[in-house]
Image (tube, rainbow, N blue to C red):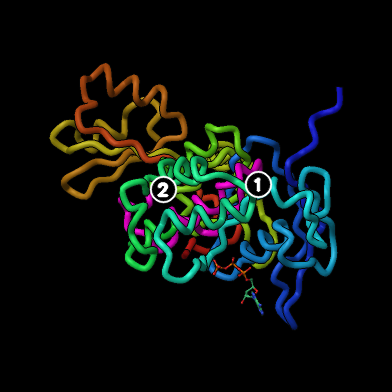
Amino acid sequence: MSPPSPALAVSGVRKHYGDVRAVDGVSFDVAEGEFVGILGPNGAGKTTTLEIAEGLQEPDDGTVRVFGTSPWPRDPALLPRIGVQLQASSFFDRLTAREQVTTFAALYGVGQARADEMLELVGLADKADAPEKKLSGGQRQRLSIACALVHDPDLVFLDEPTAALDPQARRNLWDVLREIKSRGKTIVYTTHYLDEAEVLCDRVAIMDHGRILAMDAPARLVRGLEAATHVTLDTAVLSLQTAKSLPGADGAETDGVTVTITTRTPAPLLAALAERDAVAGLTVRTATLEDVFLHLTGREYRA
Ligand SMILES: Nc1ncnc2c1ncn2[C@@H]1O[C@H](COP(=O)(O)OP(=O)(O)OP(=O)(O)O)[C@@H](O)[C@H]1O
């Protein structure tokens, strides 16, 4: 049996702006139901890639297929199947939150009940009658997601939906994104936040200078580094001397308050610590996507 065709297939896409190679030969597939993040620093080419996939821009080279169809030139048959939230959302003037979503719903021939359901989904039911201008940044982001979802698209594109939000608003949006995924939608989103993508995405594409440097499940990318794990304990629980002698310990150092043990084989080390009843207050730090970025580019990650 042949594998199901992907929701999105991007192949050899390039886009130049004058001398700037914004997208420089990008290829990836997104399966139906997958949540994929495109990550990278400012100017990496994330938005341009997304806009080409959405059919908002024509690539200089390469092909895109959304559910098997080219999104460029605009295909009216495809539009109901995709939802797009742009980085800079624009709303209709002077409308309340509910009126904004209702207007988008009407454009797609969708009823009021669905518009209200979307406000509920993004946690804005209690702000339904507030003018859009009076919403906070996070609430406005959620409103634009409600508008992008109102016609029940199968594939949702979100460009930095969590940018410029405070930590609590970001967490609230994570719940919204998880809910969208649990409804079986395919999500492709861009973000600067590697930690966020690590917890939300099935797979991430790490972009830099217009190219995808790696694409895989976050855990697999991190595991591929074979980076050391750092186990930290209070010096009152364990001395530096003892720490160095434990099975699995590759090395240890202390700052006077804590002892940090470096290990590439955490299992025997953790077992030895448990045997000594030395696990109280223990913290374990493994590699993250930031370490993957450093490994791929030779640079520290700066969003
Ligand atoms: N319309 C445009 N005209 C000229 N250059 C552009 C245009 N849009 C983007 N660029 C340039 O193309 C490169 C990629 O930009 P793009 O917006 O795709 O990156 P990004 O990863 O989305 O960045 P950010 O995270 O800051 O949004 C950058 O160097 C940018 O300055």
Residue 151 on the magenta span:
yes
Amino acid at the residue labelled 1: Met
Report the front residue among 138 and 2.
138
The residue indicated by pointer 2 is 173
15 horizontally vs 238: left or right: right
Q: Is residue 159 above or below residue 214?
A: below
Q: Secondary structure at mark 2?
A: helix
Quadrant of the displayed image that contains ligand 1: bottom right
Query: Residues in magenta?
Result: 142-170
Task: Residue at 31% x, 48% y: name it.
Answer: 126
Q: Earlier in the sequence, mark 1 or mark 2?
A: 2
Task: Residue at 60% x, 42% y: name it.
Answer: 152
The residue indicated by pointer 1 is 215
Task: Residue at 21% x, 25% y: name it.
Answer: 278
228 horizontally vs 251: left or right: right
Figure quadrant of residue 94: bottom left
